[in-house]
């Protein structure tokens, strides 16, 4: 009798067991990455999960996040290629990560730090004869310990401010093609200034988002800086290699580079195609390689720019003649550098040039000279955290440079100003 009952139960359940075995496994969940620019570079600081059912109360401890970083361009060191990300907080949200009391999405806030390479969606890699930062394959696997659900399909990325740029720009001059990102202010009826930023040696290539996010250059389009200018155009050109490329080797000013004519032609073309740009308020700046090119453009075209703002200058003072100093002494310029910069050594670049300009009678040249480059937030790197001394552009992008060479505050109309406040006040005479 017992055997008969077991057989009957088996026959009854068999169709259901077969259906369970043949049913598809749970569909993997989808997610969006939120990539934010920080002082040390871009970081994946949030992930937005699509939920099967509306979420209301979310427990941070229910989620684990694992990352795999790889690139077809080369191998990434094992310690930087895969691991677990730390989840700081979780909340119900909309599809863009905005918090909601109840939503069809859950946003996880991830820990980021300049000493946590697993957070970066870019990698500095050597490709052929040059090295540069590139976007890598950045894959997440998110697991819910509560439901067992897995999210491992990326369906999009959100890049704050960067997504407001036109990233499709290309320009060709005498067989040299440059790419660029461009931002146009919204709602301004008056003519607006143009802020130009020239990237460093690690941001060359053909994807302007690298030039914009490699070291937070996009921040000139942020509301905090835009308001100082009453709205400003932002142009971020990108060279396919590096600005100091002399054709055969690198120049620090001793010989001509191969890009200055092309980038100046790009600037002129962009201004011509955007008649709302105020030609008396065009500002050029850059860091390291881009600092070299910024000064090169000012040397070649001293009457074109309303001001220059240069960090970690890579143009050697010894290759600047006294006649050139006389040509540029009336161009307003603000230099930013750190004493411990071992890449563009200040005693060979900016320090002697600054003194020569002052001795020549320059009345509107500022030089903010830091002992070192620190975490200005006091949070992400930890107490007394120091960046590479070459990274003085952090102080420019964040608009916190505010002192002159002697340590005194820079004054304008009787009040202390920052580098961007100062620059917004500069206007070329017609």
Image (cartoon, grey):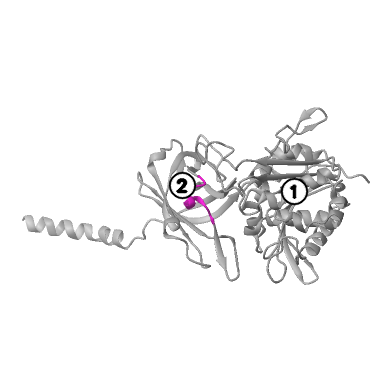
Secondary structure state at the residue bearing disc 1: helix
Q: Is residue 110 above or below residue 2?
A: above
On the image, the x and y values in percent for residue 233 come to: 78, 48
Residue designated by label 2: 51
Residue at the extreme right of the image, as rendered: 430
Q: Residue at the spot x=73%, y=42% of the render?
A: 367
Image quarter hosting the N terminus: bottom left
Kindly report the secondary structure that dominates the magenta region of the rendered protein: loop
Question: Does the magenta portion include 381?
Answer: no
Magenta region, residue range: 113-122
Q: Position of residue 414 (x, y in %)?
A: 81, 27
- The alpha-carbon separation of the residues under discs 2 and 1 comes to 60 Å
Give the residue displayed 30% in from the left and 58% down from the top. 20
Left or right: residue 330 versus residue 141 is right
286 displayed left or right of 359:
left
Residue sticking out furthest to the top: 414
Mark closer to the chain start, 2 or 1:
2
Residue 423 badge: none
Residue 411: quadrant of the picture: top right
Residue 231 lies, in percent from the top left, at 78, 41
In the rendered image, residue 114 lying in the magenta stretch gets the answer yes
Q: Dot 2: what SS? A: strand
- Which residue sits furthest left? 1
Residue at left 51%, top 64%?
A: 71
Residue 184 seen = no
- For disc 1, the marked residue is 352
Q: Is residue 175 above or below residue 359?
A: below
């Amino acid at each position: 009798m017992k055997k008969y009952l077991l057989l009957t139960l088996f026959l009854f359940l068999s169709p259901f067991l077969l259906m369970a075995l043949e049913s598809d496994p749970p569909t993997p969940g989808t997610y969006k990455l939120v990539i934010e620019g920080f002082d040390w570079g871009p970081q994946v600081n949030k992930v937005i999960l699509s939920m099967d059912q509306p979420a209301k109360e979310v427990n941070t401890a229910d989620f684990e996040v694992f990352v795999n970083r790889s690139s077809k361009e080369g191998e990434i060191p094992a310690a930087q290629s895969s691991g677990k990300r730390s989840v700081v907080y979780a909340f119900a949200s909309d599809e863009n990560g905005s918090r909601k009391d109840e939503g069809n999405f859950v946003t996880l806030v991830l820990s980021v730090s300049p000493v946590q390479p697993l957070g970066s969606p870019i990698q500095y890699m050597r490709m052929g004869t040059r090295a540069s930062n590139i976007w890598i394959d950045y894959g997440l696997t998110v697991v819910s310990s509560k439901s067992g659900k897995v999210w491992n399909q990326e369906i999009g990325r959100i890049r704050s401010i960067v997504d407001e740029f036109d990233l499709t720009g290309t320009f060709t001059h005498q067989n040299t093609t440059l790419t660029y990102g461009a931002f146009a202010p919204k709602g301004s009826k008056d003519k607006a200034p143009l802020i130009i930023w020239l990237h460093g040696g690690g941001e060359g290539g053909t994807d302007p988002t690298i030039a914009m996010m490699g070291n937070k250059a996009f921040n000139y389009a942020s509301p905090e800086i835009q308001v100082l200018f009453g709205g400003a155009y932002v142009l971020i050109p990108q060279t396919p290699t590096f600005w100091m490329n002399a054709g055969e080797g690198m120049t620090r000013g001793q010989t001509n580079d191969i890009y200055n004519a092309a980038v100046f032609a790009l600037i002129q073309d962009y201004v011509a195609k955007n008649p709302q740009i105020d030609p008396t308020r065009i500002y050029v700046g850059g860091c390291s390689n881009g600092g070299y090119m910024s000064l090169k453009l000012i040397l070649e075209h001293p009457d074109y720019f309303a001001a220059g703002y240069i960090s970690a200058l890579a143009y050697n003072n010894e290759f600047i003649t006294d006649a050139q100093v006389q040509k540029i002494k009336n161009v307003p310029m603000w230099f930013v550098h750190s004493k411990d910069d071992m890449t563009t050594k200040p005693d060979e670049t900016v320090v002697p040039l600054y003194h020569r300009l002052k001795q020549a009678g320059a009345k509107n040249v500022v030089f903010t000279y830091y002992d070192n480059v620190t975490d200005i937030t006091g949070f992400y790197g930890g107490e007394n955290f120091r960046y590479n001394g070459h990274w003085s552009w952090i102080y420019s992008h964040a608009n916190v440079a505010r002192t002159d060479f002697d340590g005194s505050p820079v004054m304008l109309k009787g009040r202390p100003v920052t580098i961007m406040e100062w620059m917004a006040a500069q206007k070329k005479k017609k």
